[in-house]
Image (cartoon, helix red, strand yellow):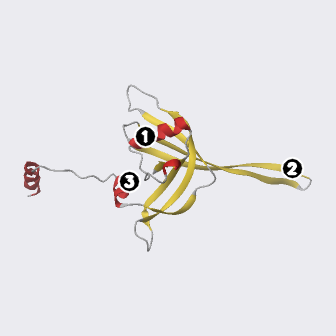
Amino acid sequence: MFRKLKDARSQVAAKLALQIEHNLQLERENDSQQTKDGAVSVSGGLTVTLELEALISDDPVNKMLYEAFMADDTLEIWEIDLSQKHASQENKYKAKYMRGKLTNWESPANVEENQTLSTTINVDGRPQDGYATVSEDQVAEITYAFVIQLSSQDQKIQTNFRT
């Protein structure tokens, strides 16, 4: 789920439609310093990036991410695990929360494939583990739930198929 940080008071986070994959990378450079007693490992700071790929669509979140990239806006990102519901609090799910900025925007247009978006977010600091409040509407959005409105004729046909 994504949202511009500056819109936190007025907007709810939303899911990017048609996401193909995302990859959360945590890296730390290590080097060794030679001493008279042997090498000592020296660690650098933690670098966190989130790479994602999605099909380009008229999805409002796709447009919001592009606008955030162009304006250099900070994003809020939630990686939510709907299989890990909080034991006692309703509508709370295990999640990672991050803030960061998009560092690139690629949208190659191949004649034989759907147009895709590839981008990377440099995360500020480290991801925070916790629980996110997720409304029923957001759960439905995340799980691609949908409702089909059937006409009375369609319902009759559907009923006939069941018997």
> Which residue: 40% across, 69% down?
90
Q: Does 47 sit left or right of 5 as displayed?
A: right
- Image position, residue 5 (x, y; %): 52, 49
Question: Extreme right residue here?
Answer: 36
Looking at marks 2 and 1 on the same chain, the residue that comes earlier in the sequence is marked by 2
Q: Nearer the viewer, mark 2 or mark 1?
A: 1
Q: Position of residue 149 (x, y in %)?
A: 18, 50
Label 2 sits on what residue type? Gln
Report the front residue among 15 and 161: 15
Tell me what residue is drawn at x 49 percent, y 54 percent: 78
Mark 1: give few (<14), some (14-19) or many (20+) Cα within 10 Å: many
Mark 1 residue element:
helix
Residue under label 2, please give it.
34
Residue labelled with disc 3: 142
Instruction: Locate residue 125 relative to residue 146 in the image: left or right.
Output: right
Q: Secondary structure at mark 3?
A: helix
Which amino acid type corresponds to the residue marked 1 in the rendered image? Asn
Crowd rating for badge 2 (residues with CA inside 10 Å; few <14, some 14–19, many 20+): few
| Nearer to us: label 2 or label 3 | 3
Give the mark nearer the N terminus: 3 vs 1: 1
Q: Is residue 88 left or right of residue 36?
A: left
Residue 27 — which label? none
- Front disc: 3 or 1: 1
Please tell me whether residue 31 is drawn above or below residue 87 in the rendered image: above
Q: Which residue is label 1 attached to?
A: 62
Which residue is nearer to you in this view: 24 or 102? 102
Instruction: Kindly identify the residue that appears in the image at 46 percent across and 29 percent down.
Output: 108
Query: Extreme bottom residue here?
Result: 88
Quadrant of image for the C terminus: bottom left
Judged from the image, the secondary structure of the residue bearing numbered disc 2 is: strand
